[in-house]
Amino acid sequence: MLLDDHARFEYLGNTPSPDVPIYTIIFLSTVVNSLIFYLLPSKLTPSLKTYVISTIHAIICVCGVINFFVRYSVNLKQINRTAGGGIYGTGDEIMAYSICYSLGYFIYDILLMLFCKSVRTTAALAHHIIILLAFYAGIINGICHPCHFYLLAEELSTIPLNLKALYHNRPRLDGIFGYLFVFSFLVSRLIYGSIICGYALCAGLDFFQMAFNADDLTSIVFGLVQGSLGFLTRVLNIYWTVLIVREVLRPSKPKNKSL
């Protein structure tokens, strides 16, 4: 059944436009991130290199989301409570470009973890695969990718976490970045991320109703997939929260007294 484009815009949004070179941006992002890894000084271990590149990615993501909200002075209620895209009647392609850049980063990082055991962790690999699937499904089908863009701001907590690892040999900085990580994780991933997911859930109810009325089964299926993947990201955040709480509450080892 052919659906009227305007009707689809009501619940899918109008971004990304067909003019966005999705695969080209993803490919270039993957290549550039890989080149940065190999061009970084050889004295750095693979893990330290990944922290540097991850920090660059996180800064770009957070700045992109902040710039979007500042530039358009938009709050969540003004973004056409659709699970689809952007602001109706505009071309908010920064969302698509940012997601494609992140997709390239996650592809690079997944490949690195597969071929380099020293940088691989089960939780990180699972997180990257879930995000990769969600972002790709969203950008290709136009379902929920604005929420994916907003969630890029969760990368705020990645910055102090990486800096803590990079400066672990400097106790003062290590402690400062540790506290900043706990605070930013609480603010960005638990509070802010939950707000965005709550917004997506509310918008999703309208989305499924409108897609059902239009007999758009494809969008309904992808919407359910997106919801499931989003739920898994929240589960991972809870898992990491438990680890953080355990680490914070772990009693410090008493120092040996000199005789």
Image (spheres, rainbow, N blue to C red):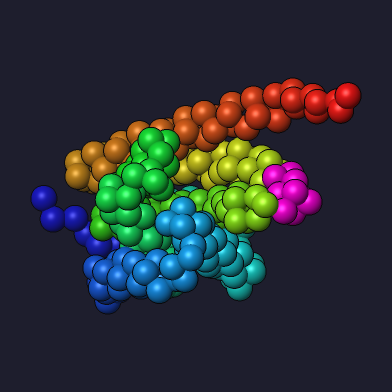
Q: Residue at x 11, y 50 (%)?
A: 1
Most extreme residue toward the bottom, as rendered?
A: 19
Question: Residue 6 magenta-drawn?
Answer: no
Q: Is residue 38 above or below residue 184?
A: below
- The location of residue 132, given as percent across then percent down, is 33, 50
- The residue shown at (26%, 69%) is 27
- Residue 170 visible, this orientation: yes
Q: Residue furthest front?
A: 259
Q: How many marks?
A: 0
Frontmost residue, 140 versus 256:
256
- For the point 22% across and 59% down, which residue is it? 4
Instruction: List the single residue furthest toward the left.
Output: 1
Give above or below for 53 relative to 200.
Answer: below
Query: Picture coordinates of residue 165 (x, y %)?
Result: 60, 50
Q: Quadrant of residue 71?
A: bottom right
Predominant SS along the magenta part: helix
Q: Which residues are magenta?
A: 170-179
**Relative horizontal placement of residue 257, taking residue 34 as reference (left or right):** right
Q: Residue at x 26, y 58 (%)?
A: 140
Asked whether 176 falls inside the magenta stretch, the response is yes
* Rendered location of residue 37, percent (x, y): 40, 66
The residue nearer to you, when weighing 112 against 41, is: 41
Residue 107's place in the image compared with 227, above or below, is below
Is residue 12 something that shows in the picture? no
Q: Classify residue 169 as left or right of residue 237.
A: right
Residue 259 coordinates in the image, percent (x, y): 88, 24
User: Outermost residue toward the right?
Assistant: 259
